[in-house]
Amino acid sequence: MKPEDIYLTDWRRIFIGEVPGEFYLELFIRAIIIYFLLMISMRLMGKRMSSQLGRNEMAALVSLAAAIGVPLQSPDRGLLPAAVIAIVVVFSERWIASKTYRSQDFEKVSQGNIDMLIKNAVIDLKTVRKVGLSRERLLSQLRVLGIKQTGTVERFYMEANGSFTLIEFSEPQPGLSIIPGWDMEFIGRHQLSEQVLACQTCGYTKELSLDNVVSCPNCHEEKWANAVT
């Protein structure tokens, strides 16, 4: 279309386009065929495609979306190219799934690693930064899972697909409160330990002593507070 053929008030072109009316009946047929093509492709790629998407599943889904978009809207494009792309995507996804099942090294390369964000109630700030997660986001995720202080967390993992897994201590220990500082009413309900201090940055705990202005051995900060029990 030439620039001089474009008008902002050309409502017919904007809403209907420059295709004959018969194309809309064809569009209905194309949409049905492509819908079933997409559903069959997702079915062949397995249950993971219909649950939480990993990197490979997301890439496959985007590829399928790109493949079906052109023949769905362009009357001069056939459906065969979309079918060929769908076959290639399905084959690639199933091959990757089979390969990851047989090789852990390939699984790490294609799916990513599991990262430990908290170990024995202490936040691994280096790993948190590596995965691109802020400390505030980490604490908010713990609150979503019902955690009030870090002393109840034995392990906290970030899975390869971006989800989180929490493992709690069978017997909670004193730790750092993760309740927002402005919620003084809720913080006031906490019972503070008189014998244990917690690093306000990473949650590392130590026994109360005469010399309390020391750097944290985990994060090297010097901000301490009474641990919450």
Image (cartoon, helix red, strand yellow):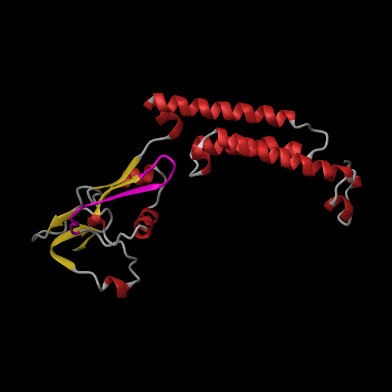
Q: Of 39 and 93, which appears nearest the observer? A: 39
Q: Of 23 and 140, which appears nearest the observer? A: 23
Outermost bottom residue: 185
Instruction: Residue 113: give x, y in percent of width and height.
Output: 38, 36
66 is higher (above) or lower (below) than 217: above
Q: Is residue 82 left or right of residue 215?
A: right
Residue that appears at 74% across and 37% down: 70
**Residue range of the region highlighted in magenta in the rendering:** 158-174
Residue 131 figure quarter: top left
Residue 19 is inside the magenta segment:
no
Quarter of the figure that contains the C terminus: bottom left
Q: Is residue 16 left or right of residue 92?
A: right
218 is higher (above) or lower (below) than 182: above
Residue that appears at 41% across and 29% down: 107
Instruction: Residue 105: give x, y in percent of width and height.
Output: 38, 26
Q: Specify the principal SS of the magenta part.
A: loop
Q: Is residue 19 visible?
A: no
Q: Is residue 204 visible?
A: yes
Q: How many marks?
A: 0
